[in-house]
Amino acid sequence: MTLPDLATKYDPSAIERAVYDRWIDAGVFAAAVDTGREPYVIVIPPPNVTSVLHMGHGLNNTIQDVFIRYRRMTGREALWLPGTDHAGIATQNVVERALAAEGLRRQDLGRERFVERVWAHVRETGDSIIDQLKALGSSCDWSRTRFTFDDAYSTAVRRVFVQLYEEGLVYRGHRVIHWCPRCLTALSDEEAEFRERDDHLYYIRYPFVGPKDQRSAGSANREGVVVATTRPETMFGDVCLVYHPDDDRFEGLRGTTVAIPLSAVPIPIEHSTAVEREFGTGMLKVTPAHDANDFDIAAALPGEFDTPVIMTDDARMADEPRVPKALRGLDRDDARERIVAELETVGLLVKVEPYRHAVRHCYRCHTVVEPRLSDQWFVKMRPLAEPALQAYRDGKLTFVPDRWGKVYEHWLTEIRDWNISRQLWWGHRIPAWYCEADECDHITVAMDEPDACGLCGESVRQDEDVLDTWFSSWLWPFATMGWPDETPDLARFYPGHTLVTGPDIIFFWVARMVMAGYHFLGERPFDTVYLNGIVRDPQHRAFSKSLGNGIDPLEVVDLYGADALRFTIVAGAGAGTDVIMDRGDMDATFAAGRNFANKLWNAGRLILSQLGDAPPPLDTLDPGAFTLADRWILSRCQRAVQEATLALERFRPNDAANIAYHFVWDELADWYLEQVKPRLYGSVDGGGGARAILVTVFETSLRLLHPVMPFITEELWGHLPGERGALLAGAEWPRPDDDLIDEAAEAEFALVQVVIGAVRAMRAEYRVPPSADVPAVVTIGSDTARRGVATEHDTIERLAKLSRLAVDEPTKGIGGHAVLSDGSAVFVALGDAIDVAQECARLRSEMERLERQVAGVAAKLANEQFVARAPKDVVEREREKESSWREQRETLAAKLHALGC
RNA sequence: GGGCGAAUAGCUCAGGGGUUCAGAGCGCCUGCCUUACAAGCAGGAAGUCGGGGGUUCGAAUCCCUCUUCGCCCACCA
């Protein structure tokens, strides 16, 4: 039998595409609605439709694929539902940048043409992310690919908006929201990220106006009161100053009037318990239109309050009477600079302190967010949050690792209403229509455009805004299955099972999907949330375009193969732990995966070359004819099956990968294959049994590795002899069975491994040429010894027998020893290849040293005072030393004896 | 301000309510192109498990504390 026609080096690029096509042609990824199998469902976190695959996708999707392939093999009707997200703000930004390169703004095109343009872009790029997922080996059911902007999906979005509106859970609110002056849209709390920033705290004097007798109180300066602020440019929007009612420093100042510096607008001083007395001067300026807290403070004041907006939507000083003429039109940063300079000039700037604080930034463009008073649509979250919270507390929803559950719980407990309207053009247009009649403020919310105002019959115009992208994403687990229609898919595949995603979108997406699932279908969308980590560079920085530290997963696929990438990712990533990859040393980063693929490939070549036509099935052979090594490898294989299965059930794909790796490499390749070679090559009997066992064990290995390394395992599977029929991707996962464990064989073989290890160590130590067969004496425990040949291949069985043989006369030779797990020692003496006299001398001097040590410690322990007074652990340690050294002395003595010194 | 996570061999990481636990991969050293694989084989060196304290017969592992990194949440402007 010759080696099959397989390259000596595994070349992934030669097979991956063909293998993937075989899966697609066979339809193994397609989930059926009409089988009796229990479903297992994962919905993909839909990547942005315009995105290019990055390593985060690689990590996330590989793990999903491992889970879905495993379940598919265990006989579940596995559905991995793929798709993409229209990603409102992100996609709009991409297209706007492209326009900018042409010197255009979206306003130049107008809404309709702009949206057309985005659609064109989406059509152009939409498939590329899908193709890239395929290159990773993702076993999605592509026939069910969805897009969050599909017509059917849009219907679901509108339906949800309308229903929530009718339930009073969607409402229109007038309040201070986060506004991105670059994207020109409102953002939700989650989209406005805190970032540390070095700023200044400006102490500004607001001079008194009015009768002089009001101008004294506490520590307030007669010239006015001093306020500390980080945002002097907002002061023209101030409506009052407030201090804490219990703050005696300002006693009596309430009701006094001060002037806003530079504009001389008079504002009153009021009380508010919201003031933190220790901060700044204890006096706070209240700018209700440009600070959410100030809005609340003002709202709590008696009477009506003004809410002057003094900035434009792109954060310039507004053309408003309150704003000094010279400042109007200035950008907020320039305005700040000018204002501070002016204040200095007029003597109202008391001092400036450096100040580091967290400022909200747009999560898309990282511009500092401007708090801004405006009208927006909100979702009332509290009622939605309750079932989602309860599900976690009742254990119906589990997080892996569990700590993220606490994060989820905390957010839901503190949840605030969700601003869902965005001032964008790309997205689901809000299905709300306003009456155009002046005196009518009726709002019609409906699935379809109404002909006229539902109240007065006048014509209507639709809300200009679109919905937050996440307002469509949160419906993903069921809108993708046809909801609100009662489709077969929905009936069969909802609720789903596992969600695999990053912890960064627990709030954005995970929690909201749970809320939507319970609210609209009365069921959780999944039972387990597996959080993968983040891919980082060796400095532990997240991969980013600007740092240029990222690794393109497709480049890795090209260089090392998808399986090598997948193995590296899976083996290197426990749940919630980050994966470190080094752009600067790709070889080192992916070596383990690449090397292992090659090892598996070559083990496959050897095995396949020996199988011939299908060997007889294992159960037709006489187990009595199995050798120790046979029984051992069968048992170890079953051990690997059990452990890998358990690991996958516990959502520990990294453990499963490593278990299979070590079984294949350390046990199957390093020991069993070496051991059976003489049988295979005919120098020893038993080749038939060996082949039957090889095929069984190898086939099982391929199954175990398939979820992690689908391409190479599928390819090798295809070369197995006999009619194995279907693809490995659709084959059965090995069944764990305790009865297949042979503990006696494992123990005995472990002994053999130790003995052989000792022989090899000595051969290396004494430079015995690999080609030389050297007579050896093996001594186990106090038993001894028999002549054997301490070389490879046929040694195992022989040594196994030796280990049970009776004493024979010691032979001259050189040796070493090893300690077995049961504590007994093994001596191995090699034959005449070495200078015995020299070795004897070395051993004797070692013996002398040991004698001295034993005598020393024995004397110490004979000292009663030491034993009585010294700390117990010290005494114990001395005792341990003594017995250890005595043991070593025994060992050495036996060795000397064996050598005949 | 609150919370979470991490610190183990040169690098990246497993382990973790007590025996078998000081491990893996990569790197390094020595010897081998042995007819599956040099992306390999055999052998080997290397860590007082971040510091300190505590509980215990016994702690990398449990408790306290400190230090250093990272992350999340948060209405002291």
Image (cartoon, coloured by chain):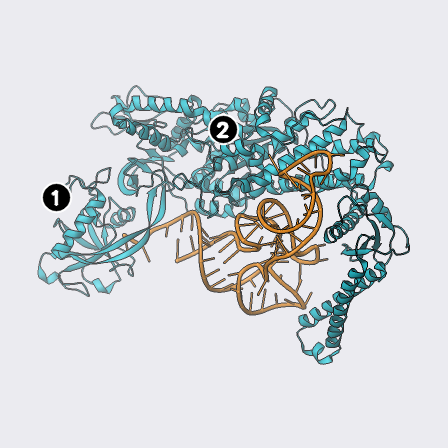
Count residues near mark 2 (Cα–Cα under 10 Å), then give few for <14, some for 14-19, many for 20+. Answer: some
The three-letter code of the residue at mark 1 reads: Ala
Q: Earlier in the sequence, mark 1 or mark 2?
A: 2
What residue is shown at x 38% (from left), y 35% (from top)?
A169
Location of the N terminus of chain A by quadrant is: top right
Q: Nearer the viewer, residue A701 or A608?
A: A608
Q: Colour of chain A?
A: cyan
Location of the C terminus of chain A by quadrant is: bottom right
Q: Nearer the viewer, residue A883 or A51?
A: A883
Residue A455 drawn at (x, y percent): 28, 25
Q: CA distance from mark 1 to mark 2?
A: 55 Å
The three-letter code of the residue at mark 2 reads: Gln
Which element is circle 2 on?
Answer: helix
Which element is circle 1 on?
Answer: helix
Q: Which residue is mark 1?
A: A326
Report the side of A268 relative to A861 (left or right). Answer: left
Confirm whether residue A816 shows in the render: yes
Q: Which of the numbered marks, if any, corresponds to residue A132?
A: 2
Report the side of B57 relative to A258 (left or right). Answer: right
Q: Colour of chain B?
A: orange
